[in-house]
Amino acid sequence: MKRVRWVVAGLVLALLFIGVPCYLTESALHLDPARCVEPDRARAEAIACEAGATLEAAEVRGADGARLRGWTFVPALEKDNGKAVLLLHGVGDSRRGMLGFARYFSSHGFTAIAADWRSHGISEGAEVTYGLRERDDVSRWADYALSLRAGAKLYGFGMSMDAAVLLQALPRETRFRSVVAECSCSTFRDAAAERIPRMTGLPAALASLVLVPAFTYGSLRYGLDFNAISPLAGIQQTPIPVLLIHGLADYRTAPEHSRRLLAAAPKGMAELWEVPGAQHVRASEVAQIEFENRVMRWFEK
């Protein structure tokens, strides 16, 4: 009987420290195909029309050859303010989730680029890597944006995990005039440690132990260093002004993440707006007018 208990205990430990970490890593890297919804071009065309813009297909190639696809909302010539903005959606979303922002920016004279990031929507890409590959994709989309008009002023607007991607890109991609990052994490490790208990029901103490085998599996199986996913390191080195936005009712990524980012930024290079009552990436819904005013002022830099 004692031997049986030891066998059962061994199986439970194997599940906890091998099965669960492998499952979580695979789920993070390969999203459920049902979440990769194709973009609705008819809706995008209607939004472009409302904004007085034209809709064009956009595509760039990642360093690995992945075809990354999106839309460009081009304002009418008489409204064009000479600015372009990259719109970065969150994990599990697609360019469809950024159409409201595309309408807003293009109606104010911006060339707005809404893309499906790698392994999202109809863009290619073997895995979602939370910035390890996507930060280079940001530079490729920046190349595209600036190719549309010589001398354009470039801005970035990112939400959730792709706000984190944007921050990681900043030390290398210095062509942005300023950026907005809503509900970014500070590091991938800290974000994962917070989310694993909600996903698995494990106590926080055990959840933190799962990270080591999960990160080891990602490194051995895919060559990915999850410890290197650090918006915190990105903002520490940024020469670009960053407006951080975080809802105080965000239960997915705690507001403390943006506070850490603010503290790490070079003096005078970042501001933080905390929005009472706003859940994850919902600041524009809770405080629409103030949201628009703050972002537009930030994009005057």
Image: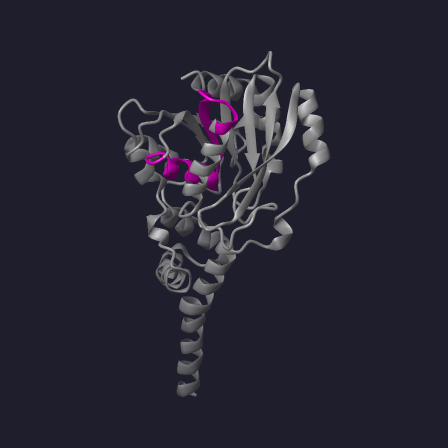
Q: Is residue 69 above or below residue 99?
A: below
Judge by depth and name the residue closer to the eye, 27 or 116: 116
Look at 35% across and 33% down and name the residue there. 259
| For residue 124, side relative to residue 34 (left or right) | left
The image's colour scheme reads: one colour
Residue, far top: 78
Residue 120 inside the magenta-drawn segment? no
Judge by depth and name the residue closer to the eye, 140 or 251: 140
Where does the C terminus fall, quadrant-wise?
top left
Judge by depth and name the residue closer to the eye, 75 or 191: 75
In x, y percent, where is residue 252?
48, 43
| For residue 191, side relative to residue 108 (left or right) | left
| For residue 185, side relative to residue 145 (left or right) | left
Q: Tell me which segment is drawn in magenta.
A: 147-172
Q: Is residue 209 above or below residue 168?
A: below
Which quadrant of the view contains residue 38? top right
Where does the N terminus fall, quadrant-wise?
bottom left
In x, y percent, where is residue 66?
51, 49
Look at 54% across and 46% down and name the residue there. 67
Q: Is residue 291 above or below residue 99?
A: above
Residue 170 inside the magenta-drawn segment? yes
In x, y percent, where is residue 272?
39, 26
In x, y percent, where is residue 182?
46, 32
Look at 73% across and 34% down and name the residue there. 42
Is there any visible trace of residue 245 in the rendered image?
Answer: no
Is there any visible trace of residue 81 in the rendered image?
Answer: yes
Judge by depth and name the residue closer to the eye, 210 or 295: 295
How many numbered marks have been drawn onto this rendered protein structure? 0
